[in-house]
Image (spheres, rainbow, N blue to C red):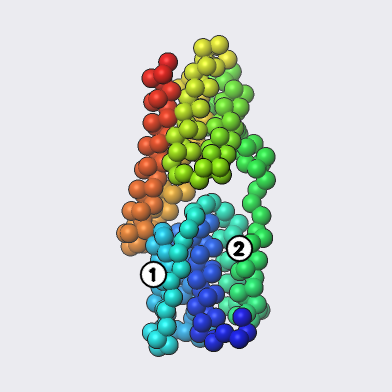
Amino acid sequence: MDQQPYAQLVLNTCLKAGKIMMESGSEVYRVEDTMKRIAQNAGFDDVQTYVTATGLVVGFPTENTSQVIQITKLSTNLEKVAAVNRASRWFAEQEISLAEFYDVLENIGNDTPDFPFSWQLLAAGVVSSTLMIILNGRWFDFIPTFLIGSIGYLIHALIDQKLQMRFLNDFLAALAIGFLAILAAKFTLVKDVNATIVGSIMPLVPGLAITNSFRDIMEGHLISGMARATEAFFIAGAIGAGIIVAFNFY
């Protein structure tokens, strides 16, 4: 990195930070603000940024240079977002150099751990069963809902990992949840099948995408906001279709 022109190093650092944040579930306005602050702290006040859900553009008009990078896979890992913000503050306070900042971003992108999958399954079960109770479900259905929610999340993650087909994993996971809840009701393992289904699909609901879409729209990022809202709409439609198919099958 030391052999690169300084302006190019600043560009690469801005794009690396923005890419990590966007792919980890950050809002568009936060990504733009972070990239602008990095450039300004590096001595480039005339920085232009353009962020969408599928790509980032950063340019320095005074240097006659700009660069674009593609956003490939969206996920949810707010630990990475927090790590980028923390490293950005270190750079702003001159605790690390620009080259060291870029190396830190490389480590964040490659080495920041996510929660173990077993913890994610446990969290999915807890969310499912507790929300079922909040939705006026019965304590008798607590453990079955916990198991059905965990199984649905497991199917969702495995299909996403193996097939990598967006929305299909949501449909099949919801379909499995519907089948399991109906079977549990048939064998009197649950008493309120509706509350069990609603609670079990909650870990699949795109809450972060919905929240970010509204925040982006309110910040004036209409394209990204509508793109994320459309994505959330299709995910919700796939989940609903899976439940409908399960009910119609029986």
In the rendering, at what x and y percent does residue 36 appear?
A: 46, 75
- Residue drawn 44% across and 34% down? 171
In the rendering, at what x and y percent does residue 189 appear?
A: 58, 15
Q: Secondary structure at mark 1?
A: strand
Residue wearing tag 2: 109
Q: Residues within 10 Å of mark 1 (few under 14, many from 20)?
A: some
In the rendering, at what x and y percent does residue 64 appear?
A: 40, 86
Q: Quadrant of the N terminus?
A: bottom right
Residue wearing tag 1: 50
The answer to whether residue 87 is above or below residue 118 is below
Q: Quadrant of the C terminus?
A: top left
Left or right? Give the position of 70 relative to 111.
Answer: left
- Residue drawn 41% across and 59% down? 53
Looking at this view, is 207 or 155 the one in front? 155
In the rendering, at what x and y percent does residue 32 appear?
A: 44, 68
The answer to whether residue 99 is above or below residue 155 is below
Residue 84 appearing in the image: yes
Q: How far apart in space, not on screen, are marks 2 and 1 (Cα)?
A: 21 Å
- Residue drawn 54% across and 68% down? 17
Residue 214 appearing in the image: no
